[in-house]
Amino acid sequence: MRHTRIIQALTGITVAAGGVVMFTPAAQAATIPVACGQNALVAAVNLANSTSAADTLRLASGCTYRMTVPHGGLANALPVITTPIEMIGPATVTRSSLLLFRIAEVSRTGKLTLTTSVKFTNGSAVGNGGAILNRGAVTLTVSSLTGNTATGNGGGLANADTPSGTAPAATFTGSTVTGNAATLSGGGIYNGQNGTLTTTGLPMFIIGNTAVVNGGGIAAVNSTATTLTGSTVTNNTAVLGGGVYRLNGTMTTTNSPISANLVNNCVGSAPAVPNCTG
């Protein structure tokens, strides 16, 4: 059955019993159960990437997928996401190695969705995006980015700076971004040039992240839009904008307390972060 699925995905041809050849659409969405193991997860991502269809990876419930070596070049635990892929938990994907690599990179054609308590943790990027470097689209629903680091921007997630073409978009719903760190900007989340970032409640927490320069919780630098709704940004740390740092771009905050951040909440932003004091 597995071999048949692979043949269908790659060629759109199924060889039935008796040698009868049947033609089927080459891009068919599939739900792929993923056994609890690094190799199984990598194989599932590769299989999902092999067609343009939106595939669902049903992760083994309660599993911790320990990534000991990178599989997406030298920088990424997972193969680079090039098509729409949804991962459904509860499960954890973690770097378990002395080697430095992030958990996932999403290309401009890719879309990564994490649903139902999927946690990306302990990613460590040399560059941007400790857990996720996003060039396409990322959605987290009741999931989390925890304890990731980046030597550049975006300890948890970085929407890559995009001077031209389609810019990345990230949406967080009822999720947590906590305990991440960046050497430059956006300890929790970095929304780069022309990117869009949307966070919504249920609730939504951005807590305990650190950036050396600015935006301990969130840094939005020359982005198109940053929209925070029902999101709590607290106990984050940076020299400027310990909670949220903004440089240009449109920003909206609604019922989103930005408080108890160090060294300040939003000082240094230009223009100011709406509904933020201190």
Image: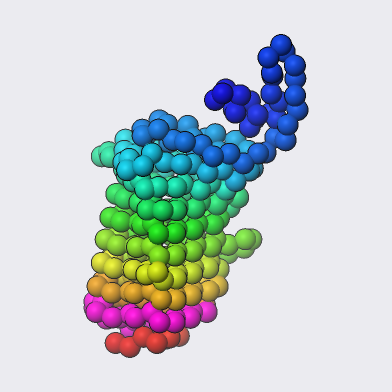
Q: Quadrant of the C terminus?
A: bottom left
Residue 150 place in picture, x, y as percent: 34, 55
Residue 90 place in picture, x, y as percent: 37, 48
Query: Residue 254 versus residue 219: which sits nearer the camera?
Result: 254
- The answer to whether residue 54 is above or below residue 158 is above
Residue displayed at 65% across by 29% down: 8
- The answer to whether residue 259 is above or below residue 37 is below
Q: Is residue 161 visible?
A: no
Residue displayed at 44% across by 59% down: 141
Q: Is residue 32 visible?
A: yes
- The answer to whether residue 88 is above or below residue 67 is below
Residue displayed at 31% across by 50% down: 121
Q: Is residue 107 magenta?
A: no
Residue 66 place in picture, x, y as percent: 31, 38
Q: Quadrant of residue 55?
A: top right
Residue displayed at 62% across by 61% down: 166
- The answer to whether residue 38 is above or below residue 191 is above
Residue 240 place in picture, x, y as percent: 31, 77
Q: How many marks can you see? A: 0
Q: Which residues are magenta?
A: 250-270
Q: Is residue 253 magenta?
A: yes
